[in-house]
Amino acid sequence: MSEMSFDEINEKYYDVLKEIGNIGAGNATTAIANMLNLKMNMSVPNVELMPVEKIGSAIGSEEQIVVGIMLGVETDIDGSMMYLMDLPSAHHLVNRLMMRDPDYDADFDEMDMSALKEIGNIISSAYLSALSGLTNLTITPTVPYISIDMAAAILSVPAIQFGMVGDKALLINTEMGDGMDISGYFILMPEGDSYEKILSALGMPV
Amino acid sequence: MGQMIKVGMADLKVCKYPDNLTTIGLGSCIGIAMYDPTTKVTGLAHIMLPDSTAIRNNSNIAKFADTGITELLNQMVKAGASKARIVAKIAGGAKMFEMAGGNSAAINVGERNAMASKAKLKELGIRLLAEDTGLNYGRTVEIYSEDGSFLVKSVGKPEKKI
């Protein structure tokens, strides 16, 4: 293994990581469209490499309430991944899934929470399966966990994870649409030498 | 009324009366507020990780409990505070996701942040007056230079003054 720091790897392979994000997000959109049985468009993902200190405000106001779904990643690579969406997007998806009035926006009950976890699970798994297909690595997600709270508080989790190895974090923003736009963010947090594994599997010299 | 000055993540700031300090959305991070009641010199640090010595990339001293608290104390003393009078209050250190352990060192980082902050304050001889740490929700905090009161705000919960 090289002596390149995590930040240097991120910068050098920005385009590769962006492409992984692109394919992963495409997969995720297809999965959601199939689940909800509707046609969905997806914008080209916007991939950002940002200082960890800025991540709390990366997706809007720090105090804005967002839904975060986090799951562990195991087998050939270790780490975790998070999918974040704003409250209107979350309500929209849950209402679709529960076949409710699209404007319904009461607080999520237990059923809604488990629906959200499932949505997060499907989106994340689709993303991971793209990554797995590209790299030929076996990547297994663990059960998802959910938190609905201030954006900065939820994002402190990836900030800390990235903060342990470097000063920058990689954020992938995608927008899906079916009339109403669903804006979501993926954050993949590889641990240890998992990044190197992904890149070498893609034929990149690390 | 003074200004409300914002302290970012992995950041620290010192102010004097009538200005006040805030940091928004503490998750697993810890907000360490320190206050000298006589000079009303007030400080707030927003640390992310417990221990700078455990990490190779440790150039930002405000990122860690150990170096962050020491630096905050130094800056407060430079601003006219007396170390003997400085007291502290802390908040944050939540576990935002109830993930089963084992998978990652980051899972219990909130708890470790709280422990490291308290240990550092003790080592420096700074009295910890109050804390609101742990559990599973985010916190926004405000420290008021007038009387050192520390306000903790969370989503869907009443404001807490400690």
Image: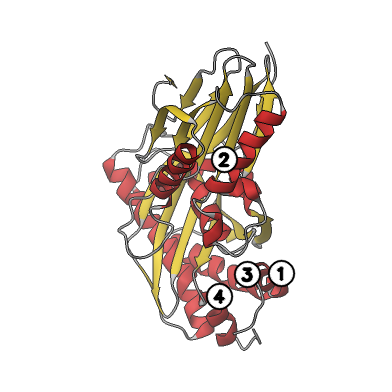
Q: How crowded is mark 3: few (under 14 residues within 10 Å), some or many (20 or more)?
A: some
Badge nearest the viewer, 4 or 2: 2
Which amino acid is tagged 4?
Tyr
Q: What residue is shown with label 1?
A: A11
Mark 2, secondary structure of its residue: helix
Q: Answer yes or no: do the residues labelled 1 and 2 have beta carbons within 8 Å?
A: no
Which amino acid is tagged 2?
Ile
Badge nearest the viewer, 3 or 1: 3
Badge nearest the viewer, 2 or 3: 2
The answer as to whether the residues below labels 3 and 1 share one chain is yes
Residue furthest to the top:
B1
A192 shown above or below B17: below
Q: What residue is shown with label 4?
A: A195
- In the figure, residue B99 lies in which quadrant? bottom left
- Is residue A44 visible in this depiction of the protein? yes
Nearer the observer, A44 or A149: A149
